[in-house]
Image (cartoon, helix red, strand yellow):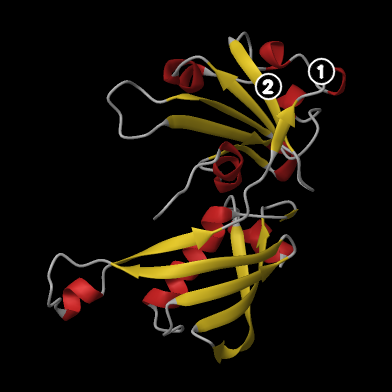
Amino acid sequence: MQAVAAEFNTPITAFLARSGPTGAGAAEFRIRWFTPVRESELCGHGTLAAAHYLIASGLVECDAIEFMAKSGRLTAKKVTLSDDASPSAEHCSKFMVELDFPVIPVAKCNSAETLPIPDTLNGASVMNELQTISAFSDLIVEVSSCAEVDNVCPNIAELVQCPGRGVAVTGPAREGSSYDFVTRFFSPKYGINEVIWHQEINLAEGCVCHS
């Protein structure tokens, strides 16, 4: 699996195997995720994509999928969208996937165990530093604005020395936005200098995501 993920060279490659027959309204699959260089313990968007594929392709006909991962049991549910009381087949084909993941607790960073983050982020105005409490500890750095998140240009060589998988930089969304916050995640240890989006940081920040 690692060799296949390295050949694909995408941020995450998800692998699925059916682990049991459909029962009690849910299908069961084992799932693992790999970056180009190593296995990831948890990946929200890889799970979201897997669930969408299984439902949209017709491989799963029920409305719930149970994924068994090294990090535990994860649930995906199909939520049908319709604007009509008597939906047509076209309307019925539109759906969201709702993920049920565990919330990841956070705590204040121990400054003695981390690098001077403002320097590592090349002068960003850091307001808060947190660390996720899990088997795959990440650093979460809060800055004052969306513009600061956009402008962060971290020292990748120094980020490799940080504990855990990587560093998330987050701040409030722009005024008038429909979002509450924006986030960038850097994970050079996993072969990805910057991850386009990182579901686990949403879990730590208490955000519920639908897609």
Looking at the image, tell me whether mark 2 or mark 1 is earlier in sequence order: 1
Specify few, some or many for label 1: CA neighbours under 10 Å numbering under 14, 14-19, or 20 or more: few
Identify the amino acid type marked 1: Ser
Residue 72 placed where, x, y %?
71, 64
Q: Are marks 2 and 1 in contact (CB under 8 Å)?
A: yes
210 is higher (above) or lower (below) than 185: below
Question: Does dot 2 land on a helix, a strand or a loop?
Answer: strand
**In which quadrant is the N terminus drawn?**
bottom right
Residue 162 placed where, x, y %?
78, 28
Q: Residue sitting at 60 percent across and 80 percent down?
A: 28
Residue with the mark numbered 1 = 111
Rounded to the nearest angstrom, the CA distance separating label 2 from label 1 is 9 Å
26 is higher (above) or lower (below) than 156: below
Foreground pick, 13 / 207: 207
Foreground pick, 179 / 11: 179
14 is higher (above) or lower (below) than 151: below
Residue with the mark numbered 2 = 129
Foreground pick, 39 / 1: 39
Identify the amino acid type marked 2: Glu
47 is higher (above) or lower (below) than 165: below
Residue 104 horizontal side relative to residue 75, left or right: right
